[in-house]
């Protein structure tokens, strides 16, 4: 039987407590990161819906469409930063992110980057008032989104 002094027991309790607190903080941070990225993706989704709805109108409001495209263009370069290690399925927090985001990080980053130029083109076409061009380009933006969703998102 091992006998520990009161001082040793106190130190052991402190170290154990700090370890548990660190694990709790990591879980809270994973939850916060996941919630933040989901909010960002919802913003992108709402912008895409507004663009698609706007382009269906008889006289599309191209300024509004450009504004929504600018929102997507602004968020697109940040997408790969929304997935730090420890915020996937292993975190224990509900997420639609597949493990492939981390096991194929280069593939994920490349797929995420495909949205950037497509969103920029859509914004430029909308700012120029090119309804036909924007209608064609929104399909390219959607295809970029689908490319990530098919491989890296749980349906």
Image (spheres, grey):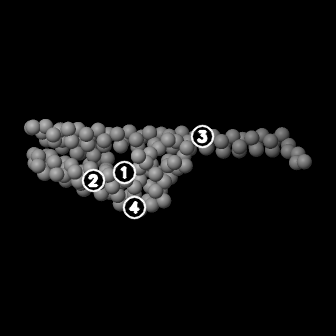
Image coords of residue 112 (percent x, y): 34, 55
Task: Give the residue drawn at x 40%, y 55%.
Answer: 151
Task: Give the residue pinned by disc 4.
Answer: 107
Residue topped by disc 3: 24
- Numbered disc 4: secondary structure: helix
State the mark number for residue 143.
Answer: 2
Crowd tier of the residue under label 1, counting other residues whose Cα lies within 10 Å: few below 14, some 14–19, many 20 or above: some
* Nearer-N-terminus badge (3/4): 3
Question: What label sits on residue 97 in the rendered view?
Answer: none
Residue 111 showing in the rendered view: yes
Q: Residue furthest front?
A: 155
Image position of 64 with respect to 153: above or below: above
Alpha carbon separation for disc pair 3 and 4: 31 Å
How far is the residue under mark 4 from the one under mark 2?
16 Å
Category of crowding for the residue at label 4, using alpha-carbon neighbours closer than 10 angstroms: few (below 14), some (14–19), many (at least 20): some
Residue 114 lies left or right of residue 93; in this view the side is left
List the residue tagged with mark 1. Answer: 149
Image marks 1 and 2: residues in contact by CB distance under 8 Å: no
Is the C-beta separation of discs 1 and 3 under 8 Å?
Answer: no
Q: Picture coordinates of residue 85 (x, y %)?
A: 50, 52
The residue at 41%/50% (across/down) is: 153
């Amino acid at each position: 039987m091992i006998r520990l002094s009161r001082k040793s027991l106190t130190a052991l309790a402190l170290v154990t407590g700090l370890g548990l607190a660190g694990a709790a903080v990591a879980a809270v941070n994973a939850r916060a990161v996941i919630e933040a990225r989901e909010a960002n993706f919802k913003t992108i989704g709402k912008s895409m819906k507004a663009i698609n709805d706007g382009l269906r109108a008889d006289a599309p409001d191209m300024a509004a469409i450009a504004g929504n495209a600018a929102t997507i263009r602004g968020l697109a370069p940040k997408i790969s930063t929304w997935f730090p290690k420890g915020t996937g399925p292993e975190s224990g927090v509900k997420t639609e992110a597949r493990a492939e985001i981390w096991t194929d990080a280069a593939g994920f980053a490349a797929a995420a980057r495909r949205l950037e130029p497509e969103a920029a083109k859509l914004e430029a076409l909308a700012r120029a008032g090119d309804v036909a061009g924007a209608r064609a380009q929104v399909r390219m933006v959607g295809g970029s989104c689908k490319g990530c969703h098919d491989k890296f998102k749980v349906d």
